[in-house]
Image (spheres, rainbow, N blue to C red):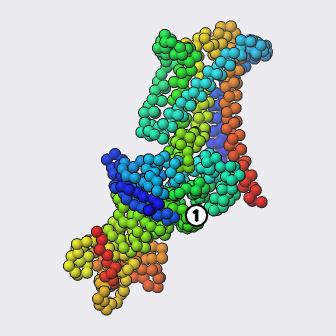
Amino acid sequence: MAFIQFEHITKRFGRNTVLDDINLDVEKGKLVTLLGPSGCGKSTLLRCLAGLENPDGGRIILDGEDITNRQPSERKVSMVFQQYSLFPNMNVFDNIAFGLKIQKIPQKQLRTMVEEMMAMVELQGKEHALPRHLSGGQQQRVALARSLVTRPKVLLLDEPLSAIDAKLRKSLQHRIQQIQRELNITCVFVTHDQDEAILMSDIIHLMNQGTVEQSGAPIELYTSPKTSFAASFIGNYNVLDGAAFAKLVGEPAKPNDVAIRPETINLTLEAPQMQPDAYVLSGEIMEFSPHGNVIRYTVRVGEQDIHADALFRSFKLFQTGQKVYAIVEKRNCLPVM
Amino acid sequence: MANRGKQKLNLTIMVLLSAYLILPLGLTFLYSLFQEWTSMLPTGFTLRYYVDLFQDPGFYLPILRTLIISTVPVLLCTAITILAMYVIVVHHPKWQKYMQIFCTIPYSLQGVILAISILALYSGLPLPFSDRIAMLVCTYCILILPYIYRGIQNSLNAINARQLIEAAMLLGYKPLAAYLRVVVPNLLSGITVSFLLSVSLLFGDFVVVNIIGGSYYPTAQMYLYKMMFRSGQQTSAMIVILFALTLLISAGVLVLQQRNKKSVAHKQEVADGFHTI
């Protein structure tokens, strides 16, 4: 039996159905991500688990107990918010100790627990600082410590890193992963950033318009998208409808769309030998742009533009207007719904 | 060069403005220190009028009544408004606009009309509705409601109250406890300003307290009114004392607030200094 089970969860705001018969499971000790664009329902689902929204239908089971109608304070679930939600009138120590005080834990034990948690998130020496005197990264670590110190069954994170700069975000992603593994705590993470999801998650549930589009391990989701939406959201796929693809490769029209990952397209200047397991397409470089250590080329093949990614090797760069050959292995042309 | 000229101009404007504001009180104070002022300068310096006031046994009770009637309605109205805002923030955010309209209506109510209307409505009813003190307190609550509401609402706008409450709920608190522990302490600066404004307003009120309180509850303002017909200098002395009292209350509240801020800053300094060593 899964540690968390969402059974037929439905939620409407007015006429808008935000969650449409969601069924998904979360295993104990895993870091599971709800990934999707804005408005897909991922935060609403998280808030239903937290008890901050009441679903209009369905059940939520946590550790074998139906918590659907329980108050947030009774669920043993903690949450880290996007805007941190630190209590402005309390210093770091009091913020972290807040959830322990209502449990009437003895002062000495409380102090020890808070200090241990502060050491875990590397905030020693900041006990008396007010939230407004901390940086964004420090505030987020306080929020994390505050959520973990009460030893919840589940830790929820609602886009906790989206307000933080890119460099610090990587460091915090790593830290959250470390802490999750060290404590073996079940985490449900919400993000719209596919790179973040792939980096951090054990399982990703890709959501779209209130439903779960596809679930799986990051590599599986990345290499084997099942729908056009999944292909276009994860991994910058080239998604071509069946007719356009057929025209491109000179084959009969396919009933489904076809998705091709840009990094699986090899570009060469010389015409390659014919390969039975690959398509060879003749095209022209229309433009290119650097993306970190990758160069993304836009290649026009016939009337179709496709994107091809290559590692950034400065001594090997195709120029705009150059005629190139794009080699695509047939196994990398994935049919999607 | 141009900057210095601008600074001088700013200073001149500030000095003139301050003089304009302080002048009436200054002259009143001066008048209370002299026996006669019929020519350019007053004559006959004396502290007699202050001494007479402090020696009058009937002086202290009206002051005390005024202090009580200025603070009790403010505290009551603040408590009610804080609880009303809890309902809106936590349970019915859409009612916010109606609350705003409701709390703005008293701005348009004239004190005389309000006092007479309330007296006409409630005086024939059984206790406690017809009790003059209760009527007075409740009337004052209506009059200061816009100021109390605005102070609280402005402070609420500065914090994400709903999310703070959600964070506290997930840490084990019930919604009301979360609101009182986490949100209300952050409203204190707004409440302080509203408190001082409302107390000053009620402290200086004569119309409402005269109509509703009358002889049942003679306050300092009514004592002052009677004194006007006896002695101009003594009236001036009384005005200065009442002003000083209002100033003391305001200063006391602000000093308390500053002390609290300094205590928090000091703790942070100590912590920073300890870890630098």
Q: Is residue B2 visible to the viewer in this orientation of the structure?
A: no
Q: Position of residue A304 (x, y in %)?
A: 28, 75
Q: Nearer the viewer, residue B221 or A198?
A: A198
Extreme left residue here?
Answer: A252
Amino acid type shown at disc 1 = Leu
Binning the other alpha carbons within 10 Å of mark 1 as few (below 14), some (14 to 19) or many (20 upward) gives few
A308 to the left or right of B205: left
Q: Nearer the viewer, residue A135 or A305?
A: A135
Q: Position of residue B226 (x, y in %)?
A: 65, 9
Q: Is residue A230 visible to the viewer in this orientation of the structure?
A: yes
Q: Position of residue A224 (x, y in %)?
A: 36, 73
Figure quadrant of residue B98: top left
Q: Which residue is mark 1?
A: A183
Figure quadrant of residue A14: top left
Q: Chain of mark 1?
A: A
Position of A151 relative to B210 (above/below): below
Location of the C terminus of chain B by quadrant is bottom right
Position of B183 relative to B103 (above/below): below
Q: Residue at x 73, y 48 (%)?
A: B266
Q: Residue at x 64, y 15 (%)?
A: B219
B11 to the left or right of B161: right
Q: Residue at x 42, y 54 (%)?
A: A60
Q: Nearer the viewer, residue B55 or B95?
A: B95
Count of marks overlaid on the render: 1
Q: Secondary structure at mark 1?
A: helix
